[in-house]
Amino acid sequence: MEILNKIKGWAGAITEVGISLISLAIVMEVLFNGQGIPFWPNISVVDNITGMIAGLSAEGLVGLVAVWVLYHIYNRK
């Protein structure tokens, strides 16, 4: 049981880091308006997220994604 708790803790930490990196990427893209950030690859995070949500909405899952996002935003420690 202790091993499962450690794995759960690692997974939670990795998820938090991922969410933080995605949030940072969105803020950087909005602040610099996609204007050649020196260390940033030539990708559009906002367009990618918008495309994923549009694809999910075509499948009727956009409500579930919205609930998931809101759950994680309001349950941060």
Image (cartoon, rainbow, N blue to C red):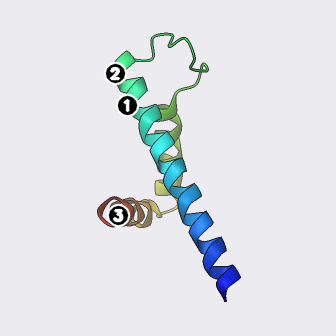
Please, what secondary structure does the residue beneath circle 1 have? helix
Identify the mark at residue 9; answer none if there is no mark.
none
Image marks 3 and 2: residues in contact by CB distance under 8 Å: no
The extreme left residue here reads 74
Q: CA distance from mark 3 to mark 2?
A: 26 Å
Q: Quadrant of the N terminus?
A: bottom right
Image marks 1 and 2: residues in contact by CB distance under 8 Å: yes
Is 5 rendered above or below residue 18?
A: below
Disc 3 packing (10 Å; few <14; some 14–19; many ≥20): few
Q: Quadrant of the C terminus?
A: bottom left
Residue sitting at 61 percent across and 65 percent down?
Answer: 11
Residue sitting at 45 percent across and 11 percent down?
Answer: 35
Residue of label 1: 27
**Nearer the observer, 59 or 66:** 66
Residue sitting at 52 percent across and 49 percent down?
Answer: 17
Q: CA distance from mark 3 to mark 1?
A: 21 Å
Is 71 rendered above or below residue 58?
A: below
Residue sitting at 35 percent across and 67 percent down?
Answer: 71
What amino acid is found at the position of numbered circle 1 in the picture? Val
Q: CA distance from mark 1 to mark 2?
A: 6 Å
Please, what secondary structure does the residue beneath circle 3 have? loop
**Nearer the observer, 63 or 77:** 77
Residue of label 2: 31
Q: Give percent across and percent down for residue 76.
A: 35, 62
Q: Is residue 63 left or right of residue 51?
A: left
Name the N-terminal-most of marks 3 and 1.
Answer: 1
What amino acid is found at the position of numbered circle 2 in the picture? Leu
The extreme right residue here reads 3
Residue of label 3: 77
